[in-house]
Amino acid sequence: MIIINIKGRAMTLHKILYWPHLICGVIAGILILIMSTTGVILTYERQIIAWAETDYERTIPVGANTLAVDEIITMNRDELNEKELRSIKILNSAEAPIIIRGKEYFYINRYSGEILGNGPKAVKVFFSEMRSLHRWLSMEGESRATARMFTGGANLMFLFIVLSGIYLWVPKVLNWKNIKKVLFFRKAKSSRGRDFNWHNVMGIWSAIPLTVIISTATVFYYSWANNLVYTLSGEEPPVRGRTVNELEPKAVFDQAITFEAMFQNAVLKRKNWTTITMTYPKLTDENIRFSVDTGNGGEPQKKADLYLNRANGAAVKWEPFQEYSAGKKARYFIRYLHTGEALGLLGQTIAGIVSLLSAIMVWTGLALAYRKYIKPFLKHKRAIQS
């Protein structure tokens, strides 16, 4: 058996990393716990909402044909308020409703045109509130920017904690006997020993996926991280906030072809499509965008954009994910890699599990810090006072 004693300079590095690791854990612990816990809750958000939406499915009437999209809009014009429409989504399921998004969502029977309701609002509101807590501590208005500063800072600290932890978890003497102590769960004689074992084991097994989750989150918080994605891809970062002179007159484009015909053009692009979503056009939009998805909604590599001319329905641009620029492809993939959705149900599950493990690591880490530093201090203080 090979035994490697890594004392000396390595021990010094161990001490140098230990204190920042501990301090960051104590300072950002509560915020990391909140983000980790809400991350667990949000794991299967997409699937749970899809399950709740099955309440709006309807049996196909005998001999019935689906109504045209344009006819459905006309039938419900007063309720929909066309000026507020944002998108129209069709699922590749005969029983599923058409989902029109305006000021709120409208689930409409595609055979009768009847508005079935506004969808599983309670479920969506719950997940929206969890996402708000996850991102900016449920703050609103100007306070949201301040909250993002704290959650973004906690996210960076968490990245350091995980990366430094990878080194700190390595035994001082590398042999299989010592490695097993931090690699597997073992029975402990005290609560401190249990917390120490759990903290190390969960940290080791979740280090790689956690590094991915935290690193991708950094892109959402900081513009420099977002720009770095494009720079590493060999592209110029996109410039945000470009203004258009609102005083300049804009052309109004006539629509000579129906939305229904456009949807049928989009259907022909992918035989195995699952959903097609049309961004509802403004009067000044010359082309209309259709998002054609062959996945579950969270797999960017299975999405494509189709732009059709609203005057004649001709395809102006067909842009599947594989043809995106390297920077756009990376940025888009990062969005769904953070939640694990880009890797399908397995990726989501892994993301949810490591989020749970990170919450436990925060708890055990704070418990260890309390027992080692706070509890002796309080005990000493009480002894002096008595």
Image (tube, helix red, strand yellow):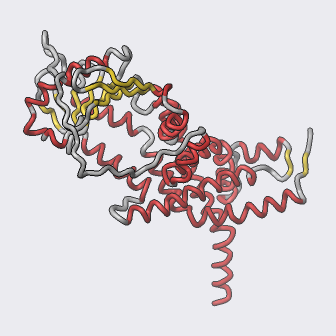
Locate the N terminus and report the quarter of the image it occupies.
top right
Left or right, 295 with reference to 93: right
Q: How many marks?
A: 0
The residue depicted at 29 percent of the width and 48 percent of the height is 125
380 shown above or below 212: below
* Coordinates of residue 267 in the picture (x, y in percent): 31, 18
Q: Is residue 264 visible?
A: yes
Closest to the observer, 274 or 312: 312
* Coordinates of residue 208 in the picture (x, y in percent): 64, 42
370 shown above or below 53: below
Left or right, 226 with reference to 367: left
Locate the C terminus and report the quarter of the image it occupies.
bottom right
Locate residue 194: give its quadrant: bottom right
The residue depicted at 19 percent of the width and 36 percent of the height is 252
* Coordinates of residue 131 in the picture (x, y in percent): 39, 50
Closest to the observer, 361 or 317: 317
The residue depicted at 23 percent of the width and 27 percent of the height is 310
The single residue placed furthest to the top in the displayed view is: 63
Closest to the observer, 279 or 221: 279
Q: Is residue 352 visible?
A: no
Left or right, 258 with reference to 359: left
59 shown above or below 383: above
The residue depicted at 45 percent of the width and 60 percent of the height is 148
Locate residue 382: give its quadrant: bottom right
39 shown above or below 111: below
Closest to the observer, 178 or 149: 149
Left or right, 330 with reference to 109: right
The single residue placed furthest to the bottom in the displayed view is: 385
